Image (spheres, rainbow, N blue to C red):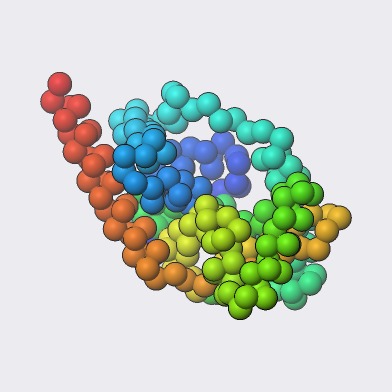
């Protein structure tokens, strides 16, 4: 059952706990990989372990870096800047749970139909995004197509959030304090959303089969 969790703060201990043994938007690119790919296999192995132990995987090695810290620092500024320019209010949300297997953590909600995702890249990355946007927009590409070409991983993450929430659009807001912001309004990609739904069903069955096998040993 779809549930909006306003009582959870992102990056808090409770937030990390609720993500244990679940598929989330941050792993959408891994989920959609070829099943022989290491990224997909690592995702499945993590969820198997966390389903059995009820704890975050012992092999977790990523604890953040200068780029994630930068994001935490600049996201509130990016959100304020977006609200000022767009006249849209962005409501803070901790987690959106689809069920006991699937959730996402968008950076905000826009009205009843939208989501918000802030990215705060370094100067040269933002500069590259702006050049690509101008080039692709001049070719007549949609915001969906532009974001996919700029960063397909972000595109899959945002479609996963639309899959979980059932909402209609997701705003990609790339912000740097010394360069123009880039806003792309990504709408539902039903083909990708269907692929996400189907892959989750397959992955769940794979996980449950392995857990059942391990319990027989």
> Taking the image as drawn, is residue 195 in sight?
yes
Q: Quadrant of the C terminus?
A: top left
The image shows residue 203, relative to residue 165, as above or below, that is above
Could you say where residue 4 lies in the image, as x and y percent from the top left?
Answer: 49, 59
Left or right of 158: which side holds 179?
A: right
**Residue 173 occupies quadrant:** bottom right
Q: Residue furthest right?
A: 178
Q: Is residue 115 above or below residue 61?
A: below
Of residues 144 and 65, the one drawn nearer to the viewer in this rendering:
144
Does residue 47 appear anywhere in the picture? no
Which image quadrant for residue 49?
Answer: top left
Q: As drawn, which residue projects farthest toward the top?
A: 217
Q: Residue furthest bottom?
A: 140
Residue at (68, 62) in percent of width and height: 132
Q: Please state the horizontal and vertical placement of residue 42, each as a whole percent of the image.
A: 39, 34
Quadrant position of residue 63? top right
- The image shows residue 150, relative to residue 36, as above or below, that is below
Q: Nearer the viewer, residue 211 or 68?
A: 68
Foreground of the two, 10 or 57? 57
Report the residue at 54% width, 69% height from top: 144
Looking at the image, which residue is at 34% across and 33% down? 45
Identify which residue is drawn at 84% across, 55% down: 177
Q: Nearer the viewer, residue 193 or 55?
A: 193
How many discs mark residues in the rendered view? Answer: 0
Query: Residue 155's x, y, as percent?
Result: 53, 59
Q: In this image, 34 relative to 139: left or right?
A: left
Q: Position of residue 182 (x, y in %)?
A: 72, 64
Point out the image quarter for the N terminus.
bottom left
């Amino acid at each position: 059952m779809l549930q909006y969790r306003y009582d959870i703060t992102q990056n808090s201990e409770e937030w990390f706990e609720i993500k244990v043994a679940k598929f989330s938007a941050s792993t959408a690119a891994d989920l959609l990989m070829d099943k022989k790919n290491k990224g997909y296999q690592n995702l499945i192995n993590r969820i198997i372990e966390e389903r059995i132990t009820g704890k975050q995987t012992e092999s977790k090695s990523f604890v953040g870096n200068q780029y994630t810290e930068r994001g935490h620092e600049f996201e509130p500024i990016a959100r304020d800047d977006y609200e000022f320019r767009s006249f849209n209010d962005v409501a803070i949300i901790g987690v959106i749970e689809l069920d006991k297997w699937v959730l996402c953590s968008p950076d905000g909600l826009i009205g009843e139909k939208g989501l918000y995702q802030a990215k705060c890249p370094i100067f040269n990355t933002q500069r590259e995004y702006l050049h690509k946007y101008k080039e692709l927009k001049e070719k007549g590409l949609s915001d969906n197509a532009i974001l996919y070409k700029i960063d397909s991983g972000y595109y899959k993450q945002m479609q996963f959030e639309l899959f979980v929430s059932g909402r209609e659009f997701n705003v990609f807001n790339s912000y740097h304090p010394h360069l123009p912001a880039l806003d792309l309004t990504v709408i539902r990609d039903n083909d990708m959303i269907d692929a996400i739904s189907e892959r989750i069903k397959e992955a769940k069955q794979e996980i449950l089969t392995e857990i059942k096998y391990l319990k027989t040993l």
